[in-house]
Image (cartoon, helix red, strand yellow):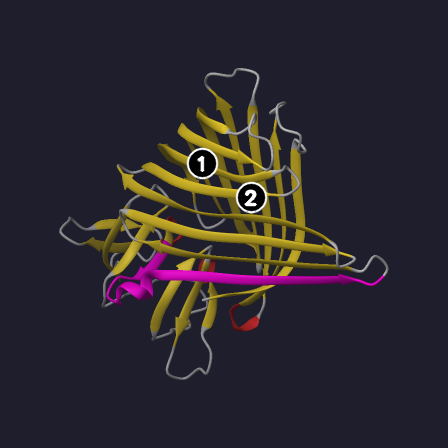
Amino acid sequence: MKNDHVLIGEIKVMENGILKMKTEYSESDFLIEWDEVKSLTTNTQFIIMLSHNYRFNGTITADPNNSDYLILYPEGGSKMFAKSQEIVFLKSFEDAFSDRISANIDVGISITKASNTQQLNASGGISYLGTKLQTDLYVNTLNNVVQDTIETNRDNYGTSLKVFFGKKWYVLGAADFLKSDEQNLDLRTTIQTGIGRDITRNNKLYLVISAGLALNAEKYTNDEKASGESIESFAESELKVYGIKDLTLSTKFQYFSIIAQNDRHRMNFTFDAKYDLPLDFYIGGNITYNFDSNKETSGSRSDYVIKSSVGWKF
């Protein structure tokens, strides 16, 4: 450490600028700001990601000739030199497949006596990350009941796959499913394929952009005229900010334009804020907004959800 303390133990993960480490002399894991790490030596392999977008499996040792640098030994490659702040992600590669998976779940409940309203929202996700592959699954659901008679629902779930090549590029595949009573949307299925690029990734923020084509299949409630299939072009961006103590902010914006209909456009926007609590719990807030310029449906052109919740990541 920069204060000349030495810690010996098991590195569980380093991401978002925080190193989680288990030692024999502590009941709970140490959470260490990566800025405070001066040097590092490992005796097992790790998934290592650098700020200039190298991804590989390897080990790390201190540079005996220059205390400002670490020596990285990629599996099957030549040794590399890097400063500690150039490392943006570490996770053991020696563990079982299940140990490379992370997940989260959160729930929020609100009850209003005056209008006899009950609302339940729940969401969760699971992710696998390797040096060449990243997969994500997610589920978001909202149930709202007013005076025990009027019930509205909104469900969104899907999966995405990224295959990395080169230093900064990846091939993207994704499937998204949305049901919304507000928009009279019985089911919208969006299948995407495209290419993306990491714009920047360090211990403070992460920004990526992507573009490609999407197949959109829609079915509206009691509105066959608006239902159908179309080919769309899309562009999207994702930004994650985690340089603020215990607080993580993330946002995603998607824009879709139907190729055969120049006057129809769709937009999806999400914003998430999470504040870390002890024992891997967190409190969070989320804003989700959807817009569709489709003039043929009788439902609303826009739909939004604002929610707060308590969650757990594991």
What amino acid is found at the position of numbered circle 1 in the picture? Thr
What amino acid is found at the position of numbered circle 2 in the picture? Lys
Q: Which residue is mark 2?
A: 179
Name which quarter of the figure residue 113 lies in.
bottom right
| Span shown in magenta | 89-113
Q: Residue at x 23, y 62 (%)?
A: 45
Residue 58, x across and y down, in percent:
22, 57
Q: Residue at x 40, y 61 (%)?
A: 102
Give the SS element for disc 2. strand
Q: CA distance from mark 2 to mark 1?
A: 12 Å
Residue 219 inside the magenta-drawn segment = no
**Position above or below: 287 against 68:** above
Q: Which residue is mark 1?
A: 190
Residue 243 versus residue 281: which sits nearer the camera? 281
Residue 43, x across and y down, in percent:
23, 68
Quadrant where the image shows the C terminus: bottom left
Q: Is residue 118 left or right of residue 56?
A: right
Quadrant where the image shows the N terminus: bottom left
**Is residue 211 shown to the viewer in this render?**
no
Residue 210, x across and y down, in percent:
41, 32
